[in-house]
Image: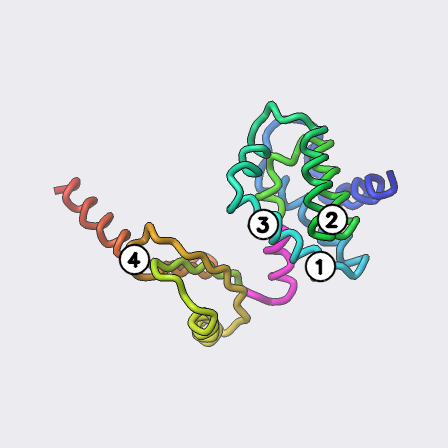
């Protein structure tokens, strides 16, 4: 009850519409929830822990098809979701604030949007640290040393700290895809093949 009261109080500053109504869930709505989580985490000196735990949930969504389907299935009961989140929280020793936040989203029927909310939260954390978010995908799996070198190079080129999210993607066939903010560099073979195909269609 105390967490819910604090959470709703934080949201009062960011409400333009009532979040409890099922009238769609915009990017702005996700930012309201994520900003409230950021402020609660900051007030309790738990930003680093909550950011790591948010990344754990996002990784689980990406790697576990069962968990991802459970979230996206509109027939999933709240009780079942709460049990799953309680188990995940206990196994990963999540902070009670984060566990309560996830439970709150389930009770408000907003857990369907958890991926968007947590990504927004992590982006807020990066912005507050003065970091630029970068996405790196490669056809060949890169070593930690190679990833570090790419991060250093991006830091020099953009004159800013870089928070790099790396993903091995065999579907690219060859090459790299790097996106920093709105800037994208795509050297993948998949992209080159797509460009050739587009030119053939247009001819």
First reached walking from the N terminus: tag 1 or tag 4: 1
Instruction: For marks 2 and 1, give the CA distance.
Output: 9 Å
Q: Position of residue 25 (x, y in %)?
A: 60, 34
Label 1 sits on a secondary structure element that is helix
Instruction: For marks 3 and 4, give the CA distance.
Output: 25 Å
First reached walking from the N terminus: tag 2 or tag 4: 2
In this rendering, would 20 be left or right of 73?
right
Q: Quadrant of residue 124?
A: bottom right
Q: Are marks 2 and 1 in contact (CB under 8 Å)?
A: yes
Quadrant assignment for the N terminus: top right
Residue segment shown in magenta: 119-131
Magenta span has 157? Answer: no
Q: Are marks 3 and 4 in contact (CB under 8 Å)?
A: no
Q: Which mark is residue 98?
A: 2
First reached walking from the N terminus: tag 2 or tag 3: 2
Instruction: For marks 2 and 4, give the CA distance.
Output: 38 Å
């Amino acid at each position: 009850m105390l967490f819910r009261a604090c959470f709703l109080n934080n949201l009062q500053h960011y409400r333009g519409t009532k979040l409890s109504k099922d009238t769609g869930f915009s990017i702005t709505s996700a930012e309201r929830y994520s900003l409230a989580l950021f402020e609660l985490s900051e007030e309790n000196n738990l930003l680093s822990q909550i950011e790591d735990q948010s990344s754990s949930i996002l990784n689980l969504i990406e790697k576990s098809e069962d968990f991802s389907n459970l979230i996206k299935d509109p027939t999933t009961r709240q009780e079942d979701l709460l049990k799953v989140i309680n188990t995940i929280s206990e196994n990963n020793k999540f902070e009670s604030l984060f566990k309560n936040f996830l439970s709150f989203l389930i009770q408000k029927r907003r857990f369907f949007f958890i991926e968007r909310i947590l990504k927004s939260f992590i982006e807020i954390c990066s912005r507050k640290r003065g970091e630029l978010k970068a996405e790196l995908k490669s056809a060949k799996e890169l070593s930690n040393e190679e990833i570090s070198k790419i991060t250093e190079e991006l830091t020099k080129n953009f004159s800013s700290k870089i928070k790099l999210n790396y993903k091995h993607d065999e579907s690219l066939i060859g090459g790299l895809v790097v996106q920093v903010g709105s800037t994208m560099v795509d050297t993948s073979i998949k992209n080159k093949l797509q460009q050739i195909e587009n030119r053939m269609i247009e001819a």
